[in-house]
Image (cartoon, rainbow, N blue to C red):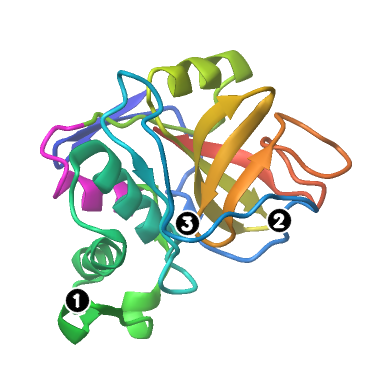
């Protein structure tokens, strides 16, 4: 087990990947999903949860990692808002200025528009969390019972889905009546069962993408 400190975030990594997982890429989502309006909120998940969760749309095609970073900063630390958090994360990781219009718009070209990896997300969040949450990254997904326990305690789980070298991260936010609520910065709200070989579930899609890595 590797242990290292990123900003104020302690990463305990059991991943078997030689390189950090690069996230954002294109692959088909499950055949059925339920969508709600962008930038909508869901109530406090439990008495232990730090605050209400806000779903943010990724502002650039490769910015699922930046949207994940921004949503986690807002949820755990009450830091910032959807758009500025994303371009600030991209600026800090790329070393370029990725916030245009006084932070109101995103610059998606050049190094600013690149995808990120798990180390990038932890580094960006470490700059703003101030110890509000300790993250763990693993090269697998939690068991169903572990996931339900995490969600019950107000812990949001970053789900990295990979397929043929491409990856995408979204966030599992809740469990109710046999279904999991997922906040996807690309597609919006999704409601998925744990598994469904025909229509796609939380751990794998019918198209071949699988839940390979987690950050929570």
Please indicate whether residue 17 sits to the left or right of residue 164 in the image.
left
What residue appears at the point 54 percent right and 19 percent down from the top-left corner? Answer: 148
Q: Which residue is mark 2?
A: 29
Give the label on residue 189, or none. none
Instruction: Look at the image and tell me in which quarter the C terminus lies.
Output: top left
Q: Nearer the viewer, residue 8 or 40?
A: 40
* Structural distance between the alpha carbons of marks 1 and 3: 25 Å
The local secondary structure at tag 3 comes to strand
| N-term mark: 1 or 3 | 3
Residue on which the image places disc 3: 22
Mark in front: 1 vs 2:
1
Q: What residue is drawn where x is 23% and y is 53%?
A: 124
Q: Is 59 placed above or below 41 here? A: below
Q: CA distance from mark 1 to mark 2?
A: 31 Å
- What span is in magenta? 119-132
The residue where tag 1 is placed is 103
Is residue 11 placed above or below 187 in the rendered structure?
A: above
Identify the residue shown where x is 67% and y is 22%.
177
**Residue 159, horizontal then vertical, whole percent:** 52, 41
Residues at badges 1 and 3 in contact (C-beta under 8 Å)?
Answer: no
- Compute the Cα span from label 2 to label 3: 18 Å
Q: Position of residue 117 (x, y in %)?
A: 40, 54
**Is the residue marked by circle 1 packed among few (<14), some (14-19), or many (20+) residues within 10 Å?**
some
Label 2 residue SS: loop
């Amino acid at each position: 087990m590797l242990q290292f400190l990123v900003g104020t975030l302690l990463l305990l990594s059991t991943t078997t990947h030689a390189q950090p997982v690069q996230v954002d890429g294109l692959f088909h989502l499950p055949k059925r999903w339920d969508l709600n309006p962008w930038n909508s909120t869901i109530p406090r998940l439990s008495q232990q949860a730090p605050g209400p969760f806000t779903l943010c749309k990724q502002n650039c095609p490769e910015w699922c990692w930046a949207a994940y970073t921004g949503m986690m900063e807002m949820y755990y630390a009450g830091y910032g808002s959807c758009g500025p958090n994303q371009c600030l994360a991209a600026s800090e990781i790329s070393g370029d200025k990725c916030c245009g219009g006084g932070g109101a718009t995103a610059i998606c070209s050049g190094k600013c528009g690149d995808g990120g990896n798990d180390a990038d997300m932890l580094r960006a969040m470490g700059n703003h969390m101030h110890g509000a949450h300790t993250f763990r990254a693993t090269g697998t997904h939690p068991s169903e019972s572990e996931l339900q326990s995490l969600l019950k305690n107000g812990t949001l789980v970053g789900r990295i889905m990979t397929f043929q070298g491409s990856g995408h991260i979204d966030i599992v936010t809740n469990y109710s009546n046999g279904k999991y609520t997922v906040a996807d910065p690309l597609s919006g709200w999704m409601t998925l069962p744990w598994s469904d070989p025909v229509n796609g579930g939380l751990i794998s899609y019918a198209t071949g993408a699988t839940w390979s890595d987690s950050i929570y």
